[in-house]
Image: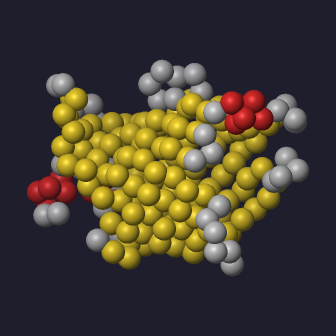
Amino acid sequence: MDEEDLKTLGPLKNLVGTWESATGNDVAPADDRGTEENKYRERIVMEPTGLVQNHEQSLYGLRYHMQAWRIGENDPFHDEVGYWLWDAKSKQVMKCVTIPRGLSMLAGGNADANARKFKLTATRGSTTFGISSGPFLEDEFQTVKFELDVVFHDDGAFSYEQTTSVKIKSKQTVFEHTDRNTLKRVGS
């Protein structure tokens, strides 16, 4: 993509490419419903989609695929696909997420076109930035809120911190499942 095409992506222009890191940290519910901490490596591929016309709305975005592996393991413990979207007119960033555990989500937030950081949220029950789960997750591990903070660094890397608030049925408590990582571009 040339510089002019990148401008159409607003703050998402900083995410184009292939990204990797081996410094991820995941704090999640364990099989016994307690807490486990996992160090992980991650790979994300983000490719521009071009213009998407939605009547009078114009969106530009990135199609992405993300996988994460616990350090020392060969099989991924997390996989997700989706889209990052930029609506320049409303100055909104959106992330459409699908996870093969029976969960989909649309998170969103406001940002300027040249933002170096932004925050996205989704809430269970929202008809705009919401969360939808299959029956097992809805009953046992109900996702009630999602927050994602993204920061672009001067060296070209980016970091994220996300909190997925999960209501665990057997404990009747909300678990703050957190993930954080800093990734470096390894390909365009």
Q: Is residue 112 above or below residue 39?
A: above
Query: In this rendering, would 64 be left or right of 121?
Result: left
Residue occupying the point 57% across, 22% down: 125
Residue 7 in picture, x, y percent from top left: 18, 53
Q: Is residue 90 above or below residue 181?
A: above
The front one of 144 and 103 is 103
Q: Is residue 106 above or below residue 185?
A: above
Residue occupying the point 17% across, 63% down: 1
Q: Quadrant of residue 133?
A: top right
Residue 90 seen in this snapshot: yes
Residue occupying the point 40% across, 52% down: 117
Colour treatment of the image: secondary structure
Q: Quadrant of residue 47?
A: bottom left
The front one of 150 and 72 is 72
Q: Quadrant of the C terminus?
A: bottom left
Residue 49 in picture, x, y percent from top left: 25, 50
Residue occupying the point 65% across, 61% down: 77
Total marks in image: 0
Residue 155 seen in this snapshot: no
Residue 106 in picture, x, y percent from top left: 46, 35
Residue 127 in picture, x, y percent from top left: 48, 21
